[in-house]
Amino acid sequence: MTELVIGEGTEVTLHFSLKLDSGEVIDSNFEGNPATFVMGDGNMLAGFEQKLTGMAVGQQEVFMVKPEEGFGQSNPNNFQTMPRDQFDDDIELVEGLMLSFADAQKAELPGVVSAFDDETVTIDFNHPLAGREIIFEAKILEIAPAVTH
């Protein structure tokens, strides 16, 4: 019997970490419980799945994920400038402050203050990791055929 490797329709259990090229850890489960997902189910970005394809149990690899393969490039259309009076006076605006907004379907939409003055506030609605290269480390713990219902 051949060893199962990661591919479409496999259930994968792994430890992973995501870091910026500065070394800053964005997310990691190496110190905690592993994550489990099914390849191709949409729970992991396709660029990350592509890096894992073909790996086997016990393998540990470090990959560089380009913005196009990960969280995308920053889109200038995702910056919106709005009147400052739309923000409560008790909110102390600073660049980098994350605020929560509601989209047209009333779903939560995070945005980051990118600039402000006495009259306007510019909010960046891009993913916080858009435009960034990500160092993706993965250690494969288990691979099984996915159970479909």
Image: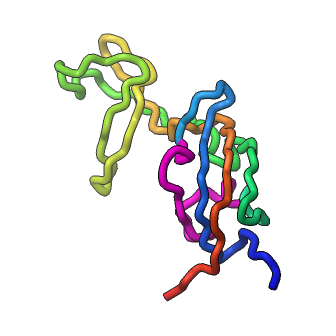
| Residue 68 locus on image (x, y percent) | 69, 46
- Residue 68 sits above or below residue 43 on the image: above
Camera-nearest residue between 21 and 56: 56
- Most extreme residue toward the top is 118
Q: Quadrant of residue 130?
A: top right
Looking at the image, residue 111 sits to the left or right of residue 139; the answer is left
Q: Which residues are magenta?
A: 28-50
- Residue 79 sits above or below residue 141 on the image: above
Residue appearing at x 61%, y 49% in the figure: 16
- Residue 94 sits above or below residue 10 on the image: above
Camera-nearest residue between 14 and 96: 14
| Residue 17 locus on image (x, y percent) | 60, 44
Residue appearing at x 23%, y 26% in the figure: 87
The color scheme shown is rainbow
| Residue 143 locus on image (x, y percent) | 65, 71
- Most extreme residue toward the bottom is 149
| Residue 122 locus on image (x, y percent) | 41, 25
Looking at the image, residue 140 sits to the left or right of residue 91; the answer is right
Camera-nearest residue between 61 and 86: 61
Q: Is residue 26 magenta?
A: no
Q: How many marks?
A: 0
Q: Quadrant of the N terminus?
A: bottom right
Q: Quadrant of residue 24?
A: top right
- Most extreme residue toward the right is 2
Residue appearing at x 65%, y 25% in the figure: 22
Q: Is residue 31 magenta?
A: yes
Residue appearing at x 57%, y 33% in the figure: 25
